[in-house]
Image (cartoon, rainbow, N blue to C red):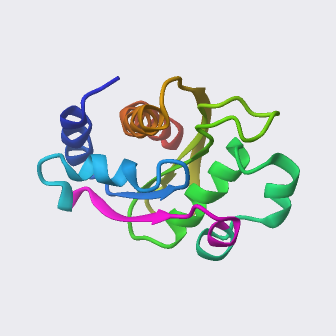
Amino acid sequence: MLSIKFVARYMADHDLSLVTAESCTAGLIASTLSEAPNAGRLLDCAFVTYTVAAKEQLLNVSADTIEKFNLTSEQVAREMAVGALARSPANVAVSNTGVVDDIDPAIRAGTQCYAWAFRQAGNNQEIVFTETRRFTGSSRKIRKRSALYALSRIPFYTAQALGNAA
């Protein structure tokens, strides 16, 4: 994984500003970025939406999406990222939803779903990428690894978004 200092420097070099929409990581993505130099120029805000109601009300996640795909799904992560981007002047949104424990027999502990949404300059369309990963370890370690992973993928998906926008 890339270091936070590298990600912060990359974001600054590419004029990226971040909004996060976090469930499982409970603000840890934003908190991790805040440790980087000049984080105030990189981070707009963070939505911590642990409950279904918070996801629906604050980020406009559809109840139908949750019912059809489950809270731990790339589809919900996608709607979280798009919803956060719509409510912020930031040009990048990162979202996370997942589980750290075996609370659902259909979803393995440590499963984390992500979305990275990029606002295209000059229009209101966004480019969105999603992934699902699984981490092992304690709840604390899973959340920490998940937050670091979410940030470390920003350069990769920025390059993809810029390539798609060209």
Relative side of 29 to 84, left or right: left
Relative side of 2 to 40, left or right: right
* Residue 148 percent coordinates (x, y): 37, 35
Q: Which residues are magenta?
A: 41-55
Q: Depth check: give the residue in front, 5 or 112.
A: 112
> Which residue does the image show at 19% across and 48% down from the upper left?
35
Above or below 28: residue 60:
below
Relative side of 64 to 93, left or right: right
> Which residue does the image show at 35% across and 23% down from the upper left?
1
- For residue 141, which quarter of the picture? top left
Give yes or no for residue 21 being in the magenta stretch.
Answer: no
Can residue 110 be seen in the rendering of this structure?
yes
> Which residue does the image show at 64% across and 31% down from the upper left?
109
Can residue 123 be seen in the rendering of this structure?
no
> Which residue does the image show at 30% across and 53% down from the upper left?
31
Above or below 104: residue 127:
below
Give yes or no for residue 49 being in the magenta stretch.
Answer: yes
Q: How many marks?
A: 0
Residue found at the far left of this picture = 37
* Residue 7 percent coordinates (x, y): 26, 37
Above or below 137: residue 78:
below
Q: Depth check: give the residue in front, 139 or 94.
A: 139
